Amino acid sequence: MAIALEAPAPASPALAIGPGLFGVKPRKKLRLVIAIILALISIGPLLYMLSLSFTPNNSFLGSSASLIPGNPTFQNYIDAWTENSFGHYFLNSVGVSVATVIITVALASLAAFAFARYKFPFRELIFYLFLASLAVPGLMLLIPQYLLLDRLHLLDSLEGLTLLYVSTNLPFTIFFLRGFFEGIPKEWEEAYRLEGAGTLRVLTGLILPLSLPAVAVVSMFTFNAAWDDFPTALTMLNSPTHYTLPIGLQYFIGAHTVAYGPFFAASVIATIPTLIVFLISLRWFRSGVSLGGIR
């Protein structure tokens, strides 16, 4: 006896759910709108600063000043780079920030590897003392740091400033890298040691390549902290030849006049390295995830 199979009833048009806006389901439209609004709020000041950097300096206080400059000029960037030794301050900041990242990541990797893989007396106590230093505001340490650099004869030097930045960023970097190192299976390390690898080779050949996402994150944070610092550099540096970029920016603001055009142009130039470091960190993050999956 044949059994008749009934075809399923077509879905009601009222209940059909299409792909939605930009291929996004309707229930996610609100999240998309909120993300777009937050993105505009975040990028709005940068676009405004970029617009003002092309505005002629004599148009800021006049009636012709507007969000979009009517007569854009590149002269502001030329003046910003050539006046007030801005180029020299820029190179000082690059040297200090890059050196801070290299030294901080190198020392923190060694310390984090020891905390993650070895057991020694007072290991946890020492680690939590590192974390406790994060609770101390940086401004409260300016006077002790000043006296310390003075006794070490490193006051008013880029080397001394770099060491201060390294000591400031080490606790967080060690904490962050230790958590990532502990997530790497010990079996991989043991297999690597069976091939004759020593401790340093395990760290540089296995642990760090698998930890590129964490290294990229702490490198970006460390670079930005050193690049944007103003109070520490202002306190520790006295010679204009040693000034960094945040200190150099204040020379565009005079007692009675402000060079708005060159000032905004200098601010845009000062923002470019942080954007480059951010983009490079994203690239390292993706390559680190892929490398970790292959290994």
Image (cartoon, grey):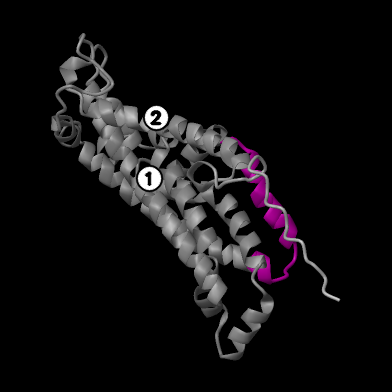
Q: Decide if residue 139 is on the left or right side of residue 236.
A: right
Q: Residue 95 appears at what percent x and percent y?
A: 32, 51
Question: Based on the displayed image, in which of its 4 quarters is residue 27 positioned?
Answer: top right
| Distance of label 1 from label 2 (alpha carbons) | 17 Å
Q: Which residue is mark 1?
A: 274
**Mark 2, residue position:** 44
Report how many numbered discs are placed on residues in the image.
2
Q: Residue furthest bottom?
A: 195
For the question of whether residue 43 can be seen, the reply is: yes
Assign the C terminus to one quadrant of the image.
bottom right
Mark before the other along the chain sequence, 1 or 2: 2
Q: Magenta segment, which residues?
A: 114-137
Q: Residue at x 39, y 32 (%)?
A: 234
Position in image of residue 97 (x %, y %): 38, 49
Secondary element at image label 2? helix
Q: Are marks 1 and 2 in contact (CB under 8 Å)?
A: no
